[in-house]
Image (cartoon, helix red, strand yellow):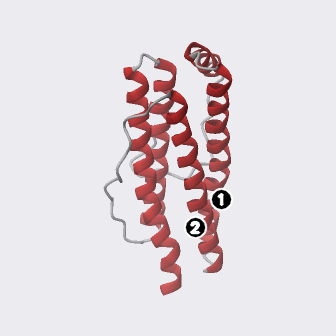
Amino acid sequence: MAETRKFAELLQTQIRHEFTAAQQYIALAVWFDARDLPRLAKRFYRQAIEERNHALAMVRYLLDRDEPVAIPGSEEVRNDFSSVHEAIELAVTQERTVTAAIEAMAKAARLEEDYLGEQFVHWFLKEQVEEVAQMSTLLTVVERAGGNLFEVENHLFREAGTPIEDAPDMPPVAGGKL
């Protein structure tokens, strides 16, 4: 049973990272809001809710598996940036870091022959491909806009016309998905 704990421990640690990501995205959203960039702000407010849902899906999984759950505080978040580019770079880095952590959880589940844990993590692996791609694309748009933030806002406005698909295969969220 000690081996199985490694996956559960990594999952518990990831809950903290997901809540921290939610807080970081709120900080980014507020930073954009303060600079009258409503589309960027909305994008990151929405992203914060998504990260919160990820954390609570992990909580629900641990509860369902009769594993102990402790809701952690979040790590420090950054609130000041020198540019939109720097803020989006932080988001890209954060998503790549989360991807590495999710991959480590998948590896731990597989090594422990925790097939239920491995199945649970698969959704998050797929999600991280999307998360990194979206943030990388946003960074590319910022770079191509060459300092014209109206172009970035227009891009996000056009993108908002595309309905966001709700992930029907997302694991259940403790307390319900927002």
In the rendered image, the residue lying farthest to the bottom is 1
Q: Nearer the viewer, residue 148 or 29?
A: 148
Residue drawn at point x = 60 percent, y = 36 percent:
166
Report the disc number at residue 122: 1
Q: For mark 2, does the 10 Å Cα neighbourhood hold few (<14), some (14 to 19), or many (20 or more) residues?
A: many
Q: Secondary structure at mark 1?
A: helix
Residue type at numbered disc 2: Met
Residue drawn at point x = 43 percent, y = 65 percent:
12
Location of residue 32 (image quadrant): top left
Q: Is residue 152 left or right of residue 41?
A: right
Residue type at numbered disc 1: His
Q: Nearer the viewer, residue 80 or 44?
A: 80
**Where is the C terminus found, in terms of image quarters?**
top left
Residue drawn at point x = 42 percent, y = 71 percent:
66
Residue drawn at point x = 60 percent, y = 55 percent:
99
Q: Position of residue 28 (x, y in %)?
A: 43, 34
Residue beneath label 2, please?
105
Q: Position of residue 127 (x, y in %)?
A: 63, 48
